[in-house]
Each structure stands twice: as C-alpha cells, then as structure tokens.
Image (cartoon, rainbow, N blue to C red):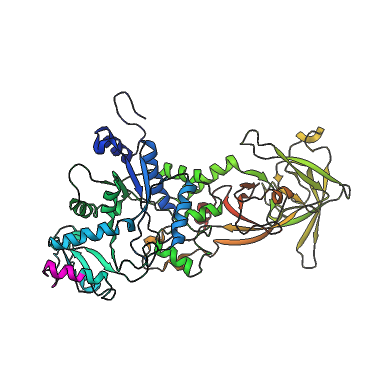
Amino acid sequence: METESGESRGLNFVEQEVLADLRAGKNGGRLNTRFPPEPNGYLHIGHAKAICMDFGVAEKFGGTCNLRFDDTNPVKEDVEYVDSIREDIHWLGFDWGDREYYASDYFPQLFDLACRLIKEGKAYVDDQSSEQIAAQKGTPTVPGTESPFRNRTPEENLDLFMRMNAGEFEEGSRVLRAKIDMASDNMHFRDPIMYRIIKHPHHRTGTTWKVYPMYDFAHGQSDYFEGVTHSICTLEFVPHRPLYDYFVDQLADETYRPRQIEFNRLNITYTVMSKRKLLALVREGLVAGWDDPRMPTISGMRRRGYTPRSIRRFIDTIGYTKYEALNSVSLLEHAVRDDLNAIATRVMGVINPLKVVITNYPEGKVETVSMENNPEEPGSGTHDMPFSREIFIERDDFMENPPKKFFRLAPGSEVRLKGAYIIKCEDVVKDADGNITELHCSYDPDTLSGLPGASRKVKGTLHWVSAAHAVDAEVRLYDRLFDVENPAAEPDRDFRDMLNPDSLVVKQIKVEPFVADNAAPGTKFQFQRIGYFTPDYDSAPGHLVFNRTIGLRDTWEKEQKKG
C-alpha cells in the first residue's frame, strides 16, 4: 500500500486523508468511523456505498466502525427497519461488534446541552409556524429577518422549553432555535431549529420525550459523544459541516473533535434513490414490498440473486470522488454477471417450450447424459440429465422460413442438442389455425459424446429438456424499474409515470429434474443461453419459483437505441 518514501498508492482521497491523520498522530493514532442510518426505510445501493466506505476504511487501517441508528423522528421509524439494516450490513460482509448505538442514547445529554445554550442566551423558543420561519430565512444574497420571539429572556425560554417537553403544547406550535446569525452567508446558521414537538411514542424511549432533536443538532454531538474520529458522509452535507462544528464547539476542546470528510453519493441510471419515493412505491402497491427484486434496496438485490461480492466490486469500480456523477446501471449488472459466471451451476430450462419428437429414437428408451456444472470452476463436477424420444426446445430456436445466418433449427437443418445428439428437422406439425404444435426430427446416434461422430460440426447448439422428465416452474423475468434513464432529471413529471410497464413478466417454464432437486435458497443457476436465476423466497417443493437475476449479456442499451 505504501512506498518506502511513505507515499500512499491505490488509495482514494478519503483513505489518503485518514492515513495522513493517522501519520500525524491525531486522536492518539485512534481511528473510529460510524455508519449512521435513519431507521425509516430499507437500505438501498447508495447506502451500500457508504457502508463500504465507513466499514472499509476502519478495516483497512485497523480502526473500528460503529453502527448508530439516527432515531430522532419516531413518527417515521420502526423496529422492522432496524432489523433489516442489521441484516443488510451483515450480508455485505461487515460487522460492528458490540458498537451498536442510537442517537436516542444521547437524548439526555442533548437535552442538557440545549438547556445550557438557553441559559447562555444562545437558543430561544419560537412560537411561529414552520411556514413563517421559512419565509423569514431570506436568500443566499438577502439577510433573513429576526423572529419577534428572538429576544425572550433565558428564563422564559427555559420555562417554555420544559413545558414543551412536558407535553403542554401542540405539535408545530413551538420550536427551539439556536440564536446564531440571521445575516450569515451560510443559510444553515440563520437560527436553525434544534428541537420540535412530537407526541408519538418512540420505539426505544416510549413516551419519555415530547421534544426531539433535529438531525443537524444531534448528528455532530452524537459523533462527539461516541468518540468518532472521522465522520464520513456525502457531499450534500458540506454546507452543514460548519454548523456541526459550531455545536461541537459548545462541548469540545482542542484535544479531540470529529473530522467530517465528504464524498459523492451513488446515483444509478433507471433508478430512484429517494426514500420518500421508494416508500411511496411500497405503500401504493406499485412494487411487492421493500424486497421486491426490482427495487434498488439491498434486500431486493439479495432476493433477486445479486451477491455481496458483486456489489462491493461495483462500488470499488466506480470509486469515490468529490464530484456528483450518474453511473450506468450496466456497470452494476456487469459486476453481478461476472461474479455469477464464476459460481453459478449450469442447468437447462426452457421458457417458451416447443415439443420435438425424435422419430427414429426408440420409444420408451431413456438415456442419461452428463452435464458440466461449471466450466469456470475447477472441480465443480457434473450432473446427470435424462434424454428421451420427446423433448422441449425453445420456440424461438425454430423458424419455418429462416433468414440467412439463422443457425438454429429450421426445416431440413441440423443442430446439436447441448450435451447430447445432433438432430435434423424433418417435419413441422400445425393445428387447424396454422400454429406450430410440434416438430418431428431425426437424430444421428453416433454424435453423442464418446462416440465416433461426436466431433461432427454443426453451426447451432440448443438447450433442451426431456418432456417426460421436465418439471414445471415459474420464472419472474425482471427488467429496469423505470424506463427513463434519469428520473430525477425530470422534476415536472410524476415519477410513477416513468415506471417501466414491462419491469416484471411471469412465465411458466420447463426445467430439468436436477434444478428441482437442488433449488435450495440462495442457489445460483445459469439457465444456459437464457440467464442467471435464483430460487425466490416464495419457492417450495412442488411450487418452484425462480427470479432471473440478470441476463447473459446486456441487451437493454441495444434495445433502447433501436427504439
């Protein structure tokens, strides 16, 4: 990682700054980061980037990382979200040990600090509505207007604040504001709100509190109370940093204070990252829940069949900068495809079956052919697959009047059945309406592996399953949730109108028996020539359900250009 001259190589800019602090002996050489999620929704891929940074930096330099839930708004929080956040972090491969904290752990200390600031004339109770306060903020070039309640005495403010917490006043009727500077160039310094009244039970503290701290008041002090050395967050918090420092200044001396470093957040094409919008999708039934495989949530990606390693590799690929960017979802999909290619078991499944009768194959005969489990994974072995007179092939693999360079099956043409024989189409059977119902083919009995004709070359190879042994299954074919590249760039449109109507297609398919016998939760399959699949949570013996994790290649961009 480092040269003899002490220069760091291969480190992102955050890691370089952390390393410089450690070399300088700041905080006694101690390193403590934290990941501070709000328990008001499920984590998404953007949070995964922050997790990899917060926990990854600590791992790389021998420090520790805390998990701290920012539970300052009981109206939106739920234990379900707390549990899901824990599960997602562990699934990504990180652990916080015994360092699980909550902003609510510090409610008494934060309340005491607020009281002290009131007594020192640095905070006051404002009776104005949120709309009035916002209107008085001014603009970046126009100073704000002072509240008519700004000059209340410390005694009156303290009495009102205590009565706010006792529940005497209605929600929205009063707030506690810091008295800083209504003409400051930094809008966050224009008497920011520190506390508001909320009369909703808290999932940890019950009804103890009737006032709750705002994020900007709780965040920096919580870092300080925990001993966090490096508060790593995204770029939108750059203008908040001076305010965090201001509040920490009320507690700290020069021997220790958290240092905030900002990096760019993760934005992906054909995706929204807004928790508000994701929650709306869930509550309005536009998706099947937070873990719907079309969602950008970590739980949705896990259910779809993404792997932790693929997500971490994607994040390593895009890196960390000080500039916002829109990353192509194809990069994420490439990382997933690359990882699954190395670990997925190769099997056969036919999505749109067309029956083929091999007329010169003995009736009642069943052979066993050997299929390689994974050519990319040495030692992965083989599995047996039955072959019989009647098989299913993919309907798209046959054309009655094919164009030039169509190397699949057509009248009079030959193809190889993957792992089995070469067959030739002799006849096409149709129903009264002219629809093709089955094909009659002949086979070359010398073309099975190990026989004299096995090396005979034909241009097409098809996947297939034995009709008599095929197992019925359901597959859910997922596509991009939105059909607009950057939904956030179209603020005048309702994001619901940008949903992709074809983001989920459900089909009944035929799979080989090996799939049914090995469809344990979390198993990764490559349905040959179709894509990567994993059993869904709904899957059970007798009712197999598979999610298509990803196709074998990226066809989306090509199709969009055609359109």
Closer to us: 4 or 271: 4
Closer-to-camera residue (548/436): 548
Residue drawn at x 71%, y 44% is 461
Q: Position of residue 82 (x, y in %)?
A: 43, 57
Compared to residue 93, the image places residue 69 above or below, namely below
Q: Position of residue 285 (x, y in %)?
A: 51, 69
Q: Quadrant of residue 541?
A: bottom right
Res 246 seen here: yes
Which region is colored magenta? 146-160
- Give yes or no for residue 62 being in the magenta stretch: no
Camera sees residue 217: no
Give the residue furthest to the top.
Answer: 4
Residue at 28% in and 38% down: 17
Along the viewing direction, whichever of 334 and 33 lies nearer the viewer:
33
Q: Position of residue 68 (x, y in %)?
A: 36, 52
Q: How many marks?
A: 0
The answer to whether residue 193 is left or right of residue 98 is left
Quadrant of the image containing the N terminus:
top left
Residue depicted at x 25% and y 65%: 195
Quadrant of the image occupied by residue 216:
bottom left
Pinpoint residue 43: horizontal percent, then vertical percent. Answer: 43, 55
Pick whichever, 63 or 411, lies toward us: 63
